[in-house]
Image (cartoon, grey):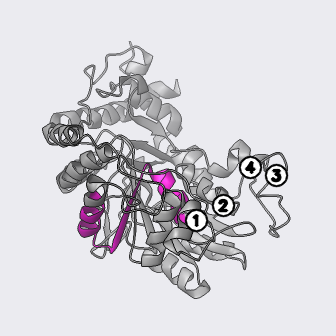
Amino acid sequence: MSKLALLGGNKVRPELFPGYKVIGAEEKAAVDRVIESGVLSRFLGCWHEDFYGGPEVQALEAEWAAYFGVKHAVSVNSATSGLYCAVGATGAGPGDEIIVSPYTMAASATAALAYNAVPVFADIEPDCFCLSAESVAQKITERTKAILVVDIFGQPYDVDGINALAKKHGLMVIEDAAQAPGATFRGKFAGALGDIGVYSLNYHKHIHSGEGGIVVTDDALLAEKVRLIRNHAEVVVGAKGFTDLVNMIGFNLRMTELEAAVAREQLKKLSGLLKQRQANVTYLNEQLRQIPCLTMPKVRPGAEHASYVHAIKFDAAVAGVDRNRFIEAVKAELSPSMLREREGVNMGCGYVKPIYLEPIYQNLIGYGDKGCPFKCPWYKGELNYGKGLCPTTERMHYDELFTHELMRPPMSKQDLDDVVAAFVKVWQNRQELKA
């Protein structure tokens, strides 16, 4: 009889893992405070003292700026909205290019399309998985407006390499730090390492308010452009006396008082939650190194990783079985986590399909049916979104990388040991998978 659960054996862990629940009495009290005030939002979409929002929103922005050591923090209703605001604030538009990562949440690239700019995909690093400075250098043209980097999985991007390229070519660096709140590079927080940074408060991030995001910068003009784009810029600039009209078509991307109140309490918990994640990852790294086909995640020298997920590389040649089959067997030994039961075991092969392989890029259809911005007359570049464009990304996704979330608080040592036991069991019985 098979020992592996995938083939009919008993599971290592039949019980659910604990859920990642970081909302508690403090957040409930904050929400009650807002409800009792009767003011759930205080934004007005015109030039008025309430243009900048209510007391909870403004307090969150001040507290976030102080925590992360930046001059300006601007709340929005999601990190996606924050990225759109950030790209808009750079002045990007038709004919421009934004260099982006192919291996991240789709919005990191779509933010360029929001302003009819064209995403240009550079490849990633084989060990840290962020944008490769070497690949970025090869993608820079006279049309490049900005580099949109991603602190993927909680790893700060290659600050030295990317920022040097930006300075040399007069480009802006937009930092998507959605997965990296609390990560640092040489003592400076991720999100504050470029010209403008974006954090996420989506429900499955380190801390959350259900939905929400924060844009940070030390540049007062960039910050004000973000505030305008967030809140109906086109009808505010005149009365405000703001004369730079580039990308001043605004939206309603505002955060509510309820979300801001919850986020204020969540921010107080970030440091403690981050330390637990990091400790759990350190323990798993130590235990899983005994399995020869696994390579534990690298942390960039000078950096502190935020451990959004545990990203591990798999060597099929050493295992004698391909990654997908091996991970399928590991997942069969485990159970889902509470609160996310419908998702199955929080472990998967690769991360996201390389963005440029999605239909919108393969068919060059964006706005309307004319192919804008890809085929608009303002764009003079030559596009390549074909398979093979970013070979490291494709190798990681289709062959080598897998990620899991079974290291989040409040995972206990016993919970972590069950995860390790599942990997060890599959490794020791991998011959069954070959059969």
Which amino acid type is marked by label 1? Gly
Which kind of residue does numbered mark 4 sit on? Gly
Label 4 with label 3: CB-CB less than 8 Å: yes
435 or 304: which is nearer to us?
304
Q: Earlier in the sequence, mark 2 or mark 4?
A: 2
N-terminal-most mark, 4 or 3: 4
Q: Is residue 234 magenta?
A: no
The location of residue 306, given as percent across then percent down, is 31, 57
Could you say which quadrant of the image residue 418 lies in? top left
Q: Is residue 250 left or right of 366 when viewed as pictured?
A: left
Q: Which residue is identified by label 2?
A: 115
The reply to whether the C-beta atoms of the residues labelled 4 and 1 are less than 8 Å apart is no
Name the residue that disc number 3 marks: 371
Name the residue carrying label 1: 88
Answer whether labels 2 and 1 touch (C-beta < 8 Å). Answer: yes
Decide which of tag 2 and tag 3 comes sooner along the chain.
Answer: 2
Under mark 2, the amino acid is Tyr
In the rendered image, the vertical position of residue 276 relative to residue 236, given as above or below? above
In three-dimensional space, the C-alpha distance between marks 1 and 3, rounded to whole angstroms, equals: 21 Å
Q: Residues within 10 Å of mark 1 (few under 14, many from 20)?
A: many
Q: Work out whether residue 205 can be spotted.
A: yes
Q: On the image, numbered disc 4 is attached to which residue?
A: 366
Say whether disc 2 or disc 1 marks the residue closer to the N-terminus.
1
